[in-house]
């Protein structure tokens, strides 16, 4: 189990505005990256390299493909750095968004990806939040709390979709759930996370 | 602009959720971008659905995927990419500002074509080197070799850009507002739901139905392919649809080169116009082509057609600008 303090329930009146990664211990690096600061670029790579690489690996069929994707993602990060606004969320989420967006675009263009071997995945998904390798950020903890309120089956589906990058059809095939059910479970789960993050107003 | 009704809003939400988990087809993505553009008056991509992308990213981190360290060789390549990216950006900024000062155009809002070219060329050089970096990965002996962009001729660089685009989409990340090139068959089709299959009829219908549609005539821009060309471009900002009409546009060899439209958007970086799609001319007296802007257009400043290699490019070298239609 983790030693994470459970997040508080989101305030009803004001959207929750997450704080920085790992509390206040790591100031954002992207503003310096945006200025082309070389040491900041290195810190950015050190801070997010494993995260981006690991996500890219999950979403890619080959190591070469993952490497291409990782290079693309970092270029996106350099390019998007000026748009990072700490008031809107944590830097880690911002980077993860960039990574996911790029990988999803790549998947859409490729469509010919082969499936990963997913043995034991359901058991892995059942233990939400027990892996301690990922640095924590406030939004992730809020999302974790929201996900833990979901039924196990729904968590598994969301895990297969979000973490493994499987298509809805692939998830339906793997879980023997109707395609429409898969879509509904994912949609409702994400809406719940979004609401927990205080972003339902848009 | 009209606010979306409940059904449209529900559909937008559905599309936004699907986009955040990669469930959108190309046509659905186009539908989302157009819907967002229509609902928000041409706001940039992602304005409406970012909250779901944020939620998906938060859920992703919450689910704690196991991490593994990035390979060192890859980290070196990325560091080199960063060096070249920021070096090229600085050069591009300097050249663009220098060129802008030299342009004595009576229309100050015009986007300093030469500056744009200079900036784009710098980025193209970076893309070319990135392509070399990628190929270097496949040839381990040269994997650490750094090739200076300045050492390459313009033609070599542009061709390398082409190779990069054909081999990978990495180059697309350097062009903020241009879509990634795809195969020509994809680019020449009318997207699902984009309108009737007869572009001329669709254009006429658009003009008839929409009183405020933008319409500007083409002007030759110096390339031989543009000599004697006339016609116009029409654009409906509300529906984000438009058509190009040409009379006398020279036939192209689609296996070697294609025409490509670029849209300069006042809401975006002027150095990086939005890719409006590639198309061919068979030399008919009149040609009508639907515009395929992959990104919502907020305030169109100009439309320009260039000749590019088959399949289109991410960043044009602007060596062959065929026609231009200025909006203001």
Image (cartoon, coloured by chain):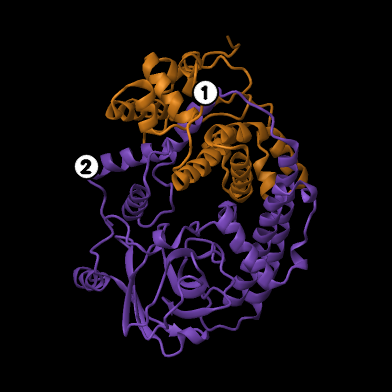
Instruction: State which chain disc 2 sits on.
Output: B
Quarter of the picture containing the N terminus of chain A is top right
SS of the residue under disc 2? helix
Residue B111 vs residue A63: left or right?
left
Q: Which residue is mark 2?
A: B7
Q: Which residue is mark 1?
A: B62
Q: Residue at x 54, y 62 (%)?
A: B314
Q: Colour of chain B?
A: purple
Q: Is residue A200 above or below residue A148?
A: below
Q: Residue at x 63, y 75 (%)?
A: B100
The orange-tinted chain is A
Q: Residue furthest top?
A: A1
Q: Residue B178 location, x and y as percent?
A: 50, 60
Q: Residue furthest bottom?
A: B228
Instruction: State which chain disc 1 sits on.
Output: B
Q: Rounded to the nearest whole Å, what is the CA distance between mark 1 and mark 2?
A: 32 Å
Q: Residue B201 location, x and y as percent?
A: 21, 72
Q: Quadrant of residue B243?
A: bottom left
Q: Is residue B125 above or below residue B139?
A: below
């Amino acid at each position: 189990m983790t030693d994470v303090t459970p997040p508080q329930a989101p305030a009803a009146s004001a959207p929750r505005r997450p704080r920085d990664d790992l509390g206040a211990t790591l100031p954002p690096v992207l503003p310096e990256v945006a200025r082309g600061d070389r040491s900041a670029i290195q810190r950015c790579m050190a801070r997010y390299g494993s995260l981006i690489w690991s996500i890219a690996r999950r979403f890619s069929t080959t190591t070469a493909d993952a490497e291409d994707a990782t290079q693309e993602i970092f270029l996106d990060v350099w390019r998007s750095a000026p748009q990072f606004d700490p008031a809107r969320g944590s830097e880690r989420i911002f980077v993860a968004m960039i990574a996911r967006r790029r990988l999803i675009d790549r998947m859409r263009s490729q469509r010919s990806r082969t499936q990963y071997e997913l043995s034991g995945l359901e058991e892995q998904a059942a233990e939400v939040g027990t892996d301690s390798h990922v640095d924590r950020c406030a939004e992730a903890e809020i999302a974790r709390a929201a996900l833990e309120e979901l039924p196990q089956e729904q968590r598994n589906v969301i895990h297969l979709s979000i973490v493994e990058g499987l298509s809805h059809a692939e998830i339906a095939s793997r879980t023997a759930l109707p395609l429409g059910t898969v879509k509904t479970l994912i949609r409702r789960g994400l809406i719940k996370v979004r609401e927990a993050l205080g972003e339902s107003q848009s | 602009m009209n606010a979306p009704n409940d059904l449209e809003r529900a559909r937008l939400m559905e599309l936004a959720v699907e986009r955040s988990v990669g469930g959108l087809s190309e046509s659905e993505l186009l539908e989302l971008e157009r819907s967002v553009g229509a609902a928000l008056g041409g706001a940039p991509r992602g304005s409406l659905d970012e909250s779901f992308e944020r939620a998906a990213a938060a859920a992703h981190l919450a689910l704690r995927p196991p991490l593994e360290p990035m390979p060192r060789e890859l980290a070196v390549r990325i560091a080199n990419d960063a060096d070249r990216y920021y070096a090229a950006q600085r050069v591009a900024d300097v050249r663009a500002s220098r060129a802008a000062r030299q342009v004595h155009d009576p229309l100050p809002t015009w986007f300093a074509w030469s500056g744009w070219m200079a900036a784009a060329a710098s980025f193209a050089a970076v893309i070319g080197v990135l392509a070399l970096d990628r190929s270097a990965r496949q040839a381990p002996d040269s994997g650490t070799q750094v090739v200076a962009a300045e050492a390459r001729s313009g033609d070599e660089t542009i061709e390398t850009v082409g190779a990069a685009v054909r081999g990978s989409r990495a180059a697309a990340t350097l062009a903020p507002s241009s879509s990634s090139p795809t195969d020509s068959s994809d680019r020449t089709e009318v997207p699902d739901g984009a309108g009737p299959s007869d572009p001329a009829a669709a254009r006429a219908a658009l003009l008839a139905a929409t009183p405020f549609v933008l319409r500007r005539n083409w002007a030759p821009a110096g390339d031989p392919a543009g000599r004697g060309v006339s016609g116009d471009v029409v654009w409906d900002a509300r529906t984000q649809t438009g058509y190009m009409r040409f009379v006398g546009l020279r036939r192209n060899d689609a296996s070697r080169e294609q025409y490509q439209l670029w849209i300069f958007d006042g809401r975006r970086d002027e150095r990086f116009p939005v890719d409006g799609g590639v198309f061919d001319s068979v030399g008919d007296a009149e040609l009508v082509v639907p515009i395929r802007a992959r990104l919502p257009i907020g305030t169109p400043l100009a439309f320009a057609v260039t000749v590019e290699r088959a399949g289109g490019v991410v960043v044009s070298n602007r060596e062959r600008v065929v026609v231009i239609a200025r909006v203001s």
